[in-house]
Image (cartoon, rainbow, N blue to C red):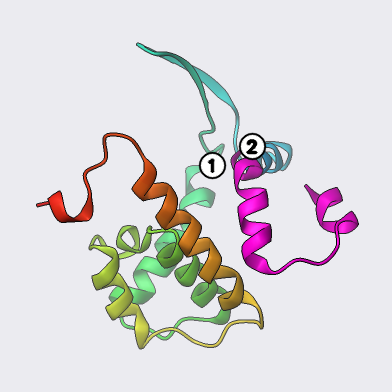
Amino acid sequence: MQRWIDTDPPQPPPAWVDRLAGHAHRTVADRLTAAGLVRPRTVRHWLGRDTVYPAVDTNVAAWPWARLSMRVRRHTRLTSRDSALARLCLATGLGGHILGADTLTARRQLRHLLTPVPPGVDELLRPLAAAAGRRRHSQPGRPSRRNRR
């Protein structure tokens, strides 16, 4: 992936998000495995086999979520790093996991806690949110927003 970024002509963030999305899962899994943070494991189920990547140390894996969740519950202003993480969670539909609420509620609660993030973060998150939304709505067997109760 890095070769694509280094050798291709400059492209706007939405183009990169669309281009890299299909490879992101495997690339992230490989990087986390190489860093010793996860250990691949094959699991069997009735449809076949899958590879899962459980954390080597669950405390290390859970710390960013725990830190962010605690700050939000205590209404503590977020650092720039935690603001970027919160924005990423909201963009990908995981905002509710921070608060145990739906993404809309999480967005409302986070709005006053967010601090400025480095230039370009929000520009990258807009197409990421759009891509995540397209993926959520294209999953088979998933009820449309209108049909959810």
Q: Amino acid at mark 2?
A: Arg
Q: Earlier in the sequence, mark 1 or mark 2?
A: 2
Secondary structure state at the residue bearing disc 2: helix
| Residue where numbered disc 1 is placed | 57
Residue 7 locus on image (x, y percent):
90, 55
Q: Residue at x 47, y 62 (%)?
A: 130
| Magenta-highlighted residues | 1-25
In the displayed structure, would residue 44 be above or below residue 41?
above
Would you identify the image quadrant in which residue 37 lies?
top right
Q: CA distance from mark 1 to mark 2?
A: 20 Å
Q: Nearer the viewer, mark 1 or mark 2?
A: 2
Nearer to me, 110 or 146: 146
Secondary structure state at the residue bearing disc 1: loop
Residue 125 locus on image (x, y percent):
54, 69
- Residue 26's label in the rendered image is 2
In the displayed structure, would residue 71 be above or below residue 51?
below
Q: Amino acid at mark 1?
A: Asp
